Amino acid sequence: MAEPMSHPAVRTAVEIMYEEYYEPITLAYLSRRVFISPFHFSRLFSRVTGATPGRFLTAVRLFEAKRLLLDSDLTVSDVVCAVGYSSVGTFTTRFTRAVGMTPSQYRDPRMRDQLVAISPHYHRLPSLAVLRESTLRESTLRESALRHALRTGSRSGRATLSARIELPHGVSAANVLVCAFADDIPQRAPVAFGGLTGQSGTATVELRGVPTGQWRVHVAAEHRGPQGNSVLTVGAIQRAATVVDDETIVLRMRTRAIRPTDPPIAVTLSSRSGSLTPSGPQAALSAIPVRRLTAV
Protein backbone atom coordinates (compact mmCIF):
# COMPACT_ATOMS: atom_id res chain seq x y z
CA MET A 1 0.00 0.00 0.00
CA ALA A 2 1.33 3.43 -0.92
CA GLU A 3 1.67 6.12 1.68
CA PRO A 4 -1.80 7.59 2.28
CA MET A 5 -0.84 11.12 1.24
CA SER A 6 0.37 9.85 -2.16
CA HIS A 7 -2.17 7.12 -2.85
CA PRO A 8 -2.69 7.20 -6.63
CA ALA A 9 -6.44 6.49 -6.54
CA VAL A 10 -7.11 9.43 -4.25
CA ARG A 11 -4.86 11.76 -6.22
CA THR A 12 -6.66 10.75 -9.41
CA ALA A 13 -10.05 11.39 -7.81
CA VAL A 14 -8.93 14.84 -6.60
CA GLU A 15 -7.66 15.69 -10.08
CA ILE A 16 -11.05 14.70 -11.52
CA MET A 17 -12.81 16.99 -9.04
CA TYR A 18 -10.65 19.97 -10.01
CA GLU A 19 -11.05 19.27 -13.72
CA GLU A 20 -14.78 18.44 -13.71
CA TYR A 21 -16.21 20.27 -10.66
CA TYR A 22 -18.85 21.93 -12.88
CA GLU A 23 -20.21 18.48 -13.86
CA PRO A 24 -22.53 16.22 -11.76
CA ILE A 25 -19.93 14.10 -9.94
CA THR A 26 -21.11 11.22 -7.76
CA LEU A 27 -19.37 8.74 -5.47
CA ALA A 28 -20.23 5.95 -7.90
CA TYR A 29 -18.68 7.90 -10.78
CA LEU A 30 -15.43 8.55 -8.91
CA SER A 31 -15.12 4.97 -7.68
CA ARG A 32 -15.58 3.66 -11.23
CA ARG A 33 -12.87 6.03 -12.50
CA VAL A 34 -10.34 4.75 -9.95
CA PHE A 35 -11.46 1.07 -10.07
CA ILE A 36 -12.31 0.77 -6.37
CA SER A 37 -15.67 -0.12 -4.82
CA PRO A 38 -17.61 2.92 -3.53
CA PHE A 39 -17.38 1.74 0.09
CA HIS A 40 -13.61 1.21 0.09
CA PHE A 41 -12.97 4.30 -2.01
CA SER A 42 -14.92 6.51 0.42
CA ARG A 43 -12.99 5.15 3.41
CA LEU A 44 -9.63 5.53 1.66
CA PHE A 45 -10.41 9.04 0.45
CA SER A 46 -11.47 10.19 3.93
CA ARG A 47 -8.34 8.72 5.51
CA VAL A 48 -6.03 10.44 3.04
CA THR A 49 -7.67 13.87 2.79
CA GLY A 50 -9.47 14.18 6.13
CA ALA A 51 -12.76 14.80 4.32
CA THR A 52 -15.40 12.69 2.61
CA PRO A 53 -15.50 12.86 -1.20
CA GLY A 54 -18.71 14.92 -0.98
CA ARG A 55 -17.22 17.50 1.41
CA PHE A 56 -14.05 17.73 -0.65
CA LEU A 57 -16.03 18.34 -3.84
CA THR A 58 -18.10 21.03 -2.10
CA ALA A 59 -14.86 22.69 -0.95
CA VAL A 60 -13.54 22.67 -4.53
CA ARG A 61 -16.76 24.19 -5.90
CA LEU A 62 -16.90 26.89 -3.20
CA PHE A 63 -13.21 27.66 -3.74
CA GLU A 64 -13.77 28.18 -7.45
CA ALA A 65 -16.93 30.20 -6.83
CA LYS A 66 -15.14 32.53 -4.42
CA ARG A 67 -12.22 32.94 -6.81
CA LEU A 68 -14.56 33.85 -9.65
CA LEU A 69 -16.59 36.23 -7.49
CA LEU A 70 -13.47 38.12 -6.46
CA ASP A 71 -11.23 37.84 -9.52
CA SER A 72 -13.62 38.01 -12.48
CA ASP A 73 -16.35 40.21 -13.89
CA LEU A 74 -18.79 37.32 -14.27
CA THR A 75 -22.29 37.91 -12.95
CA VAL A 76 -23.47 35.83 -10.01
CA SER A 77 -25.64 33.84 -12.43
CA ASP A 78 -22.61 33.10 -14.61
CA VAL A 79 -20.59 32.02 -11.57
CA VAL A 80 -23.42 29.69 -10.54
CA CYS A 81 -23.34 28.00 -13.93
CA ALA A 82 -19.54 27.90 -13.98
CA VAL A 83 -19.35 25.86 -10.76
CA GLY A 84 -22.04 23.37 -11.68
CA TYR A 85 -25.24 24.67 -10.09
CA SER A 86 -28.42 24.98 -12.13
CA SER A 87 -30.31 27.24 -9.71
CA VAL A 88 -29.15 30.66 -8.54
CA GLY A 89 -31.46 30.38 -5.54
CA THR A 90 -30.08 27.01 -4.43
CA PHE A 91 -26.49 28.19 -4.84
CA THR A 92 -27.15 31.45 -2.97
CA THR A 93 -28.77 29.59 -0.08
CA ARG A 94 -25.92 27.08 0.23
CA PHE A 95 -23.24 29.73 -0.23
CA THR A 96 -24.78 32.00 2.40
CA ARG A 97 -25.18 29.12 4.87
CA ALA A 98 -21.55 28.08 4.45
CA VAL A 99 -19.85 31.46 4.13
CA GLY A 100 -22.06 33.71 6.27
CA MET A 101 -22.78 36.23 3.52
CA THR A 102 -24.44 36.25 0.11
CA PRO A 103 -22.43 35.97 -3.13
CA SER A 104 -23.15 39.66 -3.82
CA GLN A 105 -21.91 40.70 -0.37
CA TYR A 106 -18.80 38.61 -0.95
CA ARG A 107 -17.87 40.81 -3.92
CA ASP A 108 -17.14 43.77 -1.63
CA PRO A 109 -13.61 45.04 -2.48
CA ARG A 110 -12.58 44.56 1.17
CA MET A 111 -13.08 40.82 0.74
CA ARG A 112 -10.60 40.70 -2.15
CA ASP A 113 -7.95 42.61 -0.22
CA GLN A 114 -8.25 40.21 2.73
CA LEU A 115 -8.50 36.95 0.78
CA VAL A 116 -6.65 33.87 2.03
CA ALA A 117 -6.63 31.22 -0.71
CA ILE A 118 -4.77 27.93 -0.36
CA SER A 119 -4.86 25.13 -2.92
CA PRO A 120 -2.36 23.10 -4.98
CA HIS A 121 -3.13 25.25 -8.04
CA TYR A 122 -3.67 28.74 -6.65
CA HIS A 123 -2.65 30.52 -3.49
CA ARG A 124 -2.88 34.02 -2.17
CA LEU A 125 -2.35 35.78 1.16
CA PRO A 126 -3.25 39.34 2.13
CA SER A 127 -0.63 41.94 1.31
CA LEU A 128 2.00 43.06 3.78
CA ALA A 129 0.05 46.28 4.27
CA VAL A 130 -3.07 44.38 5.34
CA LEU A 131 -1.12 42.14 7.74
CA ARG A 132 0.67 45.13 9.24
CA GLU A 133 -2.56 47.08 9.58
CA SER A 134 -4.21 44.19 11.40
CA THR A 135 -1.30 44.07 13.84
CA LEU A 136 -1.36 47.81 14.44
CA ARG A 137 -5.11 47.77 15.06
CA GLU A 138 -4.67 44.96 17.56
CA SER A 139 -3.81 47.00 20.63
CA THR A 140 -6.79 49.32 20.30
CA LEU A 141 -9.23 46.46 19.74
CA ARG A 142 -7.92 44.35 22.60
CA GLU A 143 -7.75 47.24 25.05
CA SER A 144 -11.32 48.18 24.21
CA ALA A 145 -12.48 44.58 24.66
CA LEU A 146 -10.71 44.27 27.99
CA ARG A 147 -12.17 47.53 29.29
CA HIS A 148 -15.61 46.26 28.32
CA ALA A 149 -14.97 42.93 30.04
CA LEU A 150 -13.86 44.67 33.21
CA ARG A 151 -16.93 46.93 33.21
CA THR A 152 -19.40 44.12 32.60
CA GLY A 153 -17.65 41.31 34.46
CA SER A 154 -17.62 39.26 31.27
CA ARG A 155 -14.86 36.68 30.87
CA SER A 156 -15.60 35.76 27.26
CA GLY A 157 -12.84 36.25 24.74
CA ARG A 158 -9.96 36.48 27.21
CA ALA A 159 -8.00 33.40 26.14
CA THR A 160 -4.78 33.26 24.13
CA LEU A 161 -3.60 30.79 21.52
CA SER A 162 0.19 30.88 21.18
CA ALA A 163 1.32 29.13 18.00
CA ARG A 164 5.02 28.26 17.91
CA ILE A 165 5.72 27.50 14.28
CA GLU A 166 8.69 25.70 12.81
CA LEU A 167 9.31 27.00 9.30
CA PRO A 168 11.17 24.98 6.63
CA HIS A 169 14.95 25.10 6.75
CA GLY A 170 16.83 26.97 4.06
CA VAL A 171 13.98 29.18 2.84
CA SER A 172 13.90 32.95 2.73
CA ALA A 173 12.18 35.02 5.40
CA ALA A 174 8.43 34.44 5.36
CA ASN A 175 5.23 36.29 6.08
CA VAL A 176 3.27 34.11 8.51
CA LEU A 177 -0.49 34.07 9.05
CA VAL A 178 -2.22 32.02 11.76
CA CYS A 179 -6.01 31.69 11.89
CA ALA A 180 -8.47 29.94 14.22
CA PHE A 181 -11.63 28.57 12.58
CA ALA A 182 -14.75 26.74 13.67
CA ASP A 183 -14.45 24.10 10.91
CA ASP A 184 -11.66 21.86 9.66
CA ILE A 185 -12.36 23.03 6.07
CA PRO A 186 -13.15 26.68 6.84
CA GLN A 187 -15.46 28.75 4.69
CA ARG A 188 -16.10 31.74 7.01
CA ALA A 189 -13.80 34.40 8.41
CA PRO A 190 -11.61 33.22 11.31
CA VAL A 191 -12.68 33.85 14.90
CA ALA A 192 -9.17 35.21 15.48
CA PHE A 193 -6.03 35.66 13.42
CA GLY A 194 -2.53 37.06 13.68
CA GLY A 195 0.39 37.67 11.38
CA LEU A 196 4.11 38.41 11.41
CA THR A 197 6.44 39.45 8.60
CA GLY A 198 10.05 38.58 7.83
CA GLN A 199 10.17 35.37 9.86
CA SER A 200 12.62 32.46 9.55
CA GLY A 201 13.46 29.41 11.62
CA THR A 202 10.86 29.42 14.39
CA ALA A 203 8.13 32.05 14.74
CA THR A 204 5.61 32.61 17.51
CA VAL A 205 2.24 34.13 16.68
CA GLU A 206 -0.19 34.87 19.51
CA LEU A 207 -3.93 35.05 18.95
CA ARG A 208 -5.33 37.16 21.77
CA GLY A 209 -8.92 37.52 22.86
CA VAL A 210 -9.93 34.13 21.47
CA PRO A 211 -13.51 33.20 22.43
CA THR A 212 -14.35 30.05 24.36
CA GLY A 213 -14.89 27.04 22.13
CA GLN A 214 -13.17 24.43 20.01
CA TRP A 215 -11.16 25.89 17.16
CA ARG A 216 -9.14 24.52 14.27
CA VAL A 217 -5.87 26.38 13.88
CA HIS A 218 -4.23 26.78 10.47
CA VAL A 219 -0.95 28.44 9.52
CA ALA A 220 0.26 29.65 6.14
CA ALA A 221 3.76 31.01 5.46
CA GLU A 222 4.64 32.81 2.24
CA HIS A 223 8.26 32.74 1.10
CA ARG A 224 10.10 33.97 -1.97
CA GLY A 225 11.41 31.21 -4.21
CA PRO A 226 14.76 31.17 -6.05
CA GLN A 227 13.22 32.90 -9.09
CA GLY A 228 11.38 35.46 -6.99
CA ASN A 229 8.12 33.54 -7.19
CA SER A 230 5.76 33.17 -4.25
CA VAL A 231 6.00 29.83 -2.42
CA LEU A 232 3.47 28.86 0.22
CA THR A 233 3.87 26.32 3.02
CA VAL A 234 1.02 25.36 5.32
CA GLY A 235 0.18 23.52 8.53
CA ALA A 236 -2.77 22.72 10.77
CA ILE A 237 -3.38 21.06 14.11
CA GLN A 238 -4.75 17.53 13.89
CA ARG A 239 -7.54 18.05 16.41
CA ALA A 240 -9.49 21.09 17.49
CA ALA A 241 -7.98 23.11 20.33
CA THR A 242 -10.33 23.52 23.30
CA VAL A 243 -10.16 27.14 24.46
CA VAL A 244 -11.15 28.18 27.96
CA ASP A 245 -11.21 31.79 29.14
CA ASP A 246 -8.20 33.18 30.98
CA GLU A 247 -5.88 30.46 29.67
CA THR A 248 -2.98 30.48 27.26
CA ILE A 249 -2.82 27.40 25.06
CA VAL A 250 0.53 26.74 23.40
CA LEU A 251 0.42 24.95 20.06
CA ARG A 252 3.51 23.58 18.38
CA MET A 253 3.16 23.50 14.60
CA ARG A 254 5.30 23.19 11.51
CA THR A 255 4.68 24.12 7.91
CA ARG A 256 5.13 21.94 4.82
CA ALA A 257 4.53 22.13 1.11
CA ILE A 258 0.92 22.01 -0.05
CA ARG A 259 -0.11 18.47 -0.98
CA PRO A 260 -2.27 17.68 -4.01
CA THR A 261 -4.78 16.03 -1.65
CA ASP A 262 -5.16 18.98 0.75
CA PRO A 263 -8.74 20.33 0.71
CA PRO A 264 -8.76 23.83 -0.80
CA ILE A 265 -9.41 26.77 1.53
CA ALA A 266 -10.62 30.25 0.53
CA VAL A 267 -11.69 32.69 3.24
CA THR A 268 -11.44 36.40 3.87
CA LEU A 269 -10.23 37.94 7.10
CA SER A 270 -13.30 40.15 7.06
CA SER A 271 -16.59 39.27 8.68
CA ARG A 272 -19.96 39.97 7.07
CA SER A 273 -19.96 43.46 8.55
CA GLY A 274 -16.57 44.08 7.02
CA SER A 275 -14.85 44.47 10.37
CA LEU A 276 -11.59 42.71 11.12
CA THR A 277 -11.10 40.47 14.13
CA PRO A 278 -7.31 40.40 14.32
CA SER A 279 -5.06 39.12 17.04
CA GLY A 280 -1.33 39.54 17.40
CA PRO A 281 1.69 39.94 19.63
CA GLN A 282 1.11 43.53 20.73
CA ALA A 283 -2.09 43.24 22.74
CA ALA A 284 -1.63 43.69 26.48
CA LEU A 285 -3.21 41.11 28.76
CA SER A 286 -2.59 40.37 32.40
CA ALA A 287 -0.75 37.17 33.37
CA ILE A 288 -2.91 34.10 32.76
CA PRO A 289 -2.42 30.34 33.26
CA VAL A 290 -0.70 28.43 30.47
CA ARG A 291 -1.85 25.05 29.17
CA ARG A 292 0.48 23.42 26.68
CA LEU A 293 -0.62 21.19 23.83
CA THR A 294 1.50 19.61 21.14
CA ALA A 295 -0.13 19.62 17.74
CA VAL A 296 1.62 19.13 14.43
Image (spheres, rainbow, N blue to C red):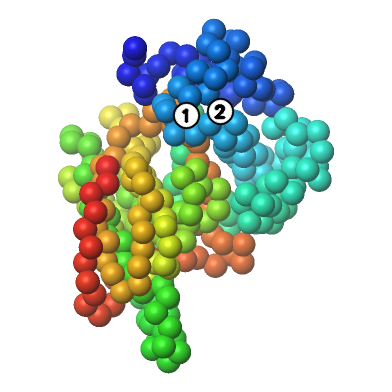
Locate the C terminus and report the quarter of the image it occupies. top left
SS at mark 2 in the image: helix
Q: Secondary structure at mark 1?
A: helix
In the picture of the structure, the residue carrying the numbered disc 1 is 46
Q: Which mark is residue 226?
A: none
Mark 2 is on which residue type?
Answer: Pro
Horizontal relation, residue 242 to residue 274: left or right: left
Kindly indicate the quadrant of the structure image that contains residue 128. Answer: bottom left
| Cβ atoms at labels 1 and 2 below 8 Å apart | yes
Q: In this rendering, does residue 43 appear at all?
A: yes
Q: Nearer the viewer, residue 285 or 198?
A: 285
Q: Which of 156/177 is in front?
A: 156
Q: CA distance from mark 1 to mark 2?
A: 7 Å
Give the residue displayed 36% in from the left and 46% down from the top: 239
Residue 144, position in %: x, y? 42, 82
Q: Quadrant of residue 136?
A: bottom left
Q: In this picture, is 61 found above or below 27?
A: below
Q: Residue furthest top?
A: 35
Structural crowding at the residue carrying mark 1, measured as other residues with C-alpha within 10 Å and reported as few (<14), some (14–19) or many (≥20)? some
Q: Is residue 282 above or below residue 37?
A: below
**Residue with the most extreme bottom position:** 151
Q: Can you give x and y, in whole percent of width and height, for residue 53 in the image?
A: 56, 28
Q: Residue at x 58, y 58 (%)?
A: 110
| Residue depicted at x 62% and y 49% | 98
Tell me, for residue 53, which label it has, or none: 2
Write the residue at 50% across / 65% down: 276
Sooner in the amino-acid sequence: mark 1 or mark 2: 1
Whether residue 127 is situated above or below residue 138 in the rendered picture: above
Of residue 19 and residue 294, the one placed in the foreground of this image is 294
